[in-house]
Image (cartoon, coloured by chain):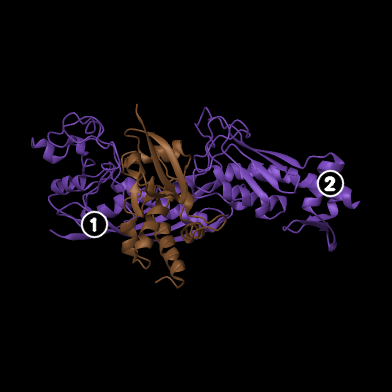
Chain colours: A purple, B brown
Amino acid sequence: MAIHKGRGFACVNYPIGMNLGGDPSQALVHATPDGKFMVTLSSIDLGQGMKSVTRQIAAEALGVSVSDVHVDTADSDTGPHCMGSFASRGTHRVGNAVIRAATEARAQLLEAAAEEMEVDAADLVTDGSGNIHVRGAPSRAITVADTAIAAQFRQGRTLAGRGIFLVPPSDADPETGEMSPVTCFAHAALVVDLEVDDETGEVTVQSIHSAYEVGRALNPRLVEQQLIGGAWMGLSHALFETTEPVYPERDPAPLDFNSYVMPGPGDIPDHHVAVLERPAPDAPYGGKGPGEMCANPVLPAVANAIYNAVGVRCDTLPITPERILRGLRELGGARPGGWSGGNFGGTGNPNGAEPRTGSGDGAGNGHGDGHGTRPAWMATGR
Amino acid sequence: MTKTAVTFRLNGAETAIFVDGGQNLLDVLRRGVGDLSPKYGCGQGGCGGCSVLVDGTLRLACITLAESVDGASVETAAGLADGPRLHPLQKAFMEGFAAQCGYCTPGMLMAARALLDANPDPAREEVVEAISGNLCRCTGYEPIIDAILAAAADLRGGAAR
C-alpha cells in the first residue's frame, strides 16, 4: 500500500454566450439631477461582479468617475430585457449594451454642455473626474453636475441613453449543420498535482497551476477571485459533491449539509493563477470574462491526474474513494503513470469505476448499460 | 399558541418581543425585529449562515430557542459597524474581496468576531477551525481566511504574522 503522485492536465476553449434564437441584452442609462448616472439593468449579479464591472464600463464610456455611476440590477419589472446571467455572457453581452447606452447618454451630456458653454459639442472632452472642457483648453470647463442641472432645469433635456447588444439568430446550414452558436471564446489550461492513497482511495490535491485567457481583465481582483473560487467548485464537483443514493436505499442520500460533502476552509490547495490578456475585438473594452470555465477544466485535470497516479480511469463524477478502490481492484493494483492498455478505444475498460449506487451486485443501477464491457469483478459474480 | 414575552439586548439596544413557543431565534430576529443580517441557509445548523453571538458566545440562531435569549445580549453582523465606520473585519473583507454573493458573509463575520474576541492573534489553522462551521459556495475560503488574519493584525495595531 502506498501513496502515488499524479499530475493531470486539461485545457478548455470556452464559448462566451449562446445563440438559441438570438442572444440580446439591454441597458438604460440616465443622469440624475446632481450629475450622477444610473445604469438600469435586469441582468443579475449572482456574486460574480456584474455590478462592479458594468459600473466600470459605464464610467469609462461616459467619461466620468466610477463613484459617479450607480448600477441597479435584477428587477425585470423596471429594468430593460436581459437574457440572463449564464453561459459566461454577462460581461460581454451586458457590457456591450452598457457601452451603447452610455455612449448615447454621453453624446447628450456633451450637447447640453455645449449649449451652456456656447461651443460645438464636437470640441468638448471629459476629464474623467466630473468636468467637461474644450479640447486643449482645460480652463474653459463646466462640471458634469452643472451640466445635468442645466439640462434638467433650463434646457428641458434628458441625459439618457438606450443600449442593446444582440447576437442575431444563427440558423444551422441545412447541408452541413454548420452554425455560429457563440461569438468569442475564452481559454484556459490547468495542471493539477495530487496524491492517491491506494489503500483508502483518498485523493489529496496538492496544487493547481492555471493560466486563463479572459480577454482584458476589466477588474483583475474580481477575475482572480472568481478563478480561485471557481477552482474550489471544480474540485468539489470532481471529488465530493453528489446526491446519489447509498445502496440499498433508492432515494437521494444527502438531504442536508451534514451529508452533502464539500471541501471546507483550508481544504483548497495552493492555486497559482496566471491571467493572460488578449482583448477580444467584439468584447467591451476587450473583456470576455472568466465565467463558467473557472470551474470546468478542474474536473478533467483531476480525473487525468488520478489516472496518472494509479491508472484508474474514472468517467463518473464525483471520483470518490470507493470508485478509485473499485478501479484499483479491477486493475489488480495501482499502475502509476497511467494504464498502458489505454482507454480510448484500446483494451481498457471504460467502466473502470462504478457508481456507488451499484455496490453489491451491479444490478439496477442503470449505469452499466451502454458502457460496453462490464468490469471483471462484475463478471465474476461478485 | 401561547406567546411569551422575551427581552434581550440586540446590538446594545433593548428589544422586547412576543415569541411563539418553540420559535427559533433566527425567525425572531429576521421576521420579528427586522434584523435581516443573519441568513437562513439550511435551518438545521449545518451552514453557519445564521451565526450570531449570544452573551459573547457563537450560536446558530436557527437552532437556538428564542425564549432562551431572554435577558441576554445578542449581537449580529448588523451591529458590527459603528455608524458609517466599518468594523475592521468588514473593512478587511471588503478590501480582500472576501465576498462574492455575500450570503455567507454575515455568518463568517460573526464567527470571525467570536474568534478574535477570544484570540486576538490567531494562527491560520485557528482561523480555519473557527470558520469550519460556515459554508461558502463562492470564494474557496482563501480570501476569507486572509481577511480575518488581516483584520486581526489591524485590531492588534500591528502587521499580519
State whether residue A37 is above or below residue A269: above
Q: Residue at x 26, y 42 (%)?
A: A259
Q: CA distance from mark 2 to mark 1?
A: 71 Å
Q: Nearer the viewer, residue A129 or B50?
A: B50
- Element type at mark 1: helix
Chain designation of label 2: A
Any part of residue A372 in sight = yes
Instruction: Residue type at mark 1: give it.
Output: Ala
- Pinpoint residue B26: horizontal percent, then vertical percent: 39, 40
**Residue at far left of view:** A381
Residue at label 1?
Answer: A309
- Pinpoint residue A57: horizontal percent, then vertical percent: 64, 50
Q: Nearer the viewer, residue B74 or A150?
A: B74
Chain designation of label 1: A
Residue at label 2?
Answer: A150
Q: Nearer the viewer, residue A303 or A176?
A: A303
Q: Quadrant of residue B131?
A: bottom left
- On screen, residue B57 versus residue A364, left or right, reads right
Q: Quadrant of residue B50?
A: top left
Q: Residue at x 24, y 30 (%)?
A: A251
Instruction: Residue type at mark 2: give it.
Output: Ala
- Element type at mark 2: helix
- On screen, residue A323 versus residue B117, left or right, reads left
